[in-house]
Image (cartoon, rainbow, N blue to C red):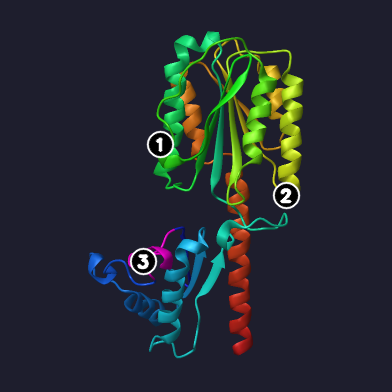
Amino acid sequence: MRFMVVLTDAPAHGLAKPSSSGGQPSDNYAVRHPHGLTPPSVMGELLSKNIDLFLCSFNPDATSKTEEELCKQYATHSGNSDQRQVSVIPLVQANQSTGSPDASISFNRHIIFVLDESGSMRDEWNGVVKAYKDYIARRQQHQCDSDLVSVVQFDNTARITVQRNPIATAPQHLYYNGGGTCFYPAAVQACSVARNTPVSHTPLVVFMSDGGTNDSAAASQEFSSLNSEIRGRTGNDLELYVIAFGQGANTAQLQLIANSSSNGTVRSSSDTNDLSKVFVEIAGGGAVVDVLEAEIGKRVSEAVSDKLTMEFKRR
């Protein structure tokens, strides 16, 4: 083995953010590890086997102390006679700042649920709420604790019932209203919520309906305008998941909404059990996964190439 690549989004034991521990170790990580491993012992093992270390962080703010300690232990270790150094590759910018289309990737999501609460959903509403909760549970299983949650509920009007709640405190109950079905008011409210997404997060819309309406083109245009704004700011299109629920859903109209973004897609669900499965699948990754894998691979490959070039020049 020639290289070790460590991908992480959290600090090692004892090396939390300075703001949360005063810059001091918050626990005795040497004792906590079941085999008594410490940064010096691990770095010594890597050096003795001539293994270069690459640290790739999805959250540079959280891992900065870990990176600092491991880099120091590696560089100053008695076995490092060649003065080798750890290569640190930030996969997300510190403080999640926005920038050009080439800016680093943001993994924090502002999840905006747009849920049909029209009269036809009365008997299905408890299942819809369960699907919403299952989505949140899956994100928490993936340690997406920085996610924000908003909810727009709509019939022939639309109302914002949850706005930018931390995922840990997202409400477990969504109260049903009932009425007709109009997509445009829901799109207007959803886009308004999305435009208020903090710069540290990326909006993601989950739009679910069991019906159809004559204003789908207007709703599509609203999402298209939002998508253009997001693309201009980040270089990426809006993640837009549209779910056609039940046999009465007008898939063609919902497809029109999904077409507002190149990252838009329509999924179908026959009942609330199926709806939960679809929600959980979306929560598990979504269309952006392939883009992220390609970007991560590119950055790691470039770093490895640079490392090999430097070693070749030293010889």
Pick whichever, 140 or 122, lies toward us: 122
Along the horizontal axis of the image, is 287 left or right of 35? right
The amino acid type of the residue labelled 3 equals: Ser
Residue that badge 3 annotates: 21
Whether residue 253 is visible: yes
The spot of residue 300 in percent (x, y) is 58, 64
The amino acid type of the residue labelled 1 equals: Ala
The residue stretch that appears in magenta = 10-22
Q: Residues within 10 Å of mark 3 (few under 14, many from 20)?
A: few
Instruction: Give the SS element for disc 3.
Output: helix
Compared with 59, 310 (above or below) is below
Q: Quadrant of residue 175?
A: top left
Compared with 144, 65 (above or below) is below
Along the horizontal axis of the image, is 28 left or right of 276? left
Q: Which residue is found at the position 72% from the left and 54% from the top?
A: 101
Name the mark nearer the viewer: 3 or 1. 3
Q: Earlier in the sequence, mark 3 or mark 1?
A: 3
Q: Main secondary structure of the magenta part?
A: loop
The amino acid type of the residue labelled 2 equals: Arg
Which mark identifies residue 137? 1
Residue that badge 2 annotates: 233
Q: Earlier in the sequence, mark 3 or mark 2?
A: 3
Instruction: Give the SS element for disc 2.
Output: helix
Q: Is residue 42 magenta?
A: no
Mark 2 and mark 3 in contact (Cβ < 8 Å)? no
Q: Residues within 10 Å of mark 1 (few under 14, many from 20)?
A: some
Whether residue 287 is visible: no
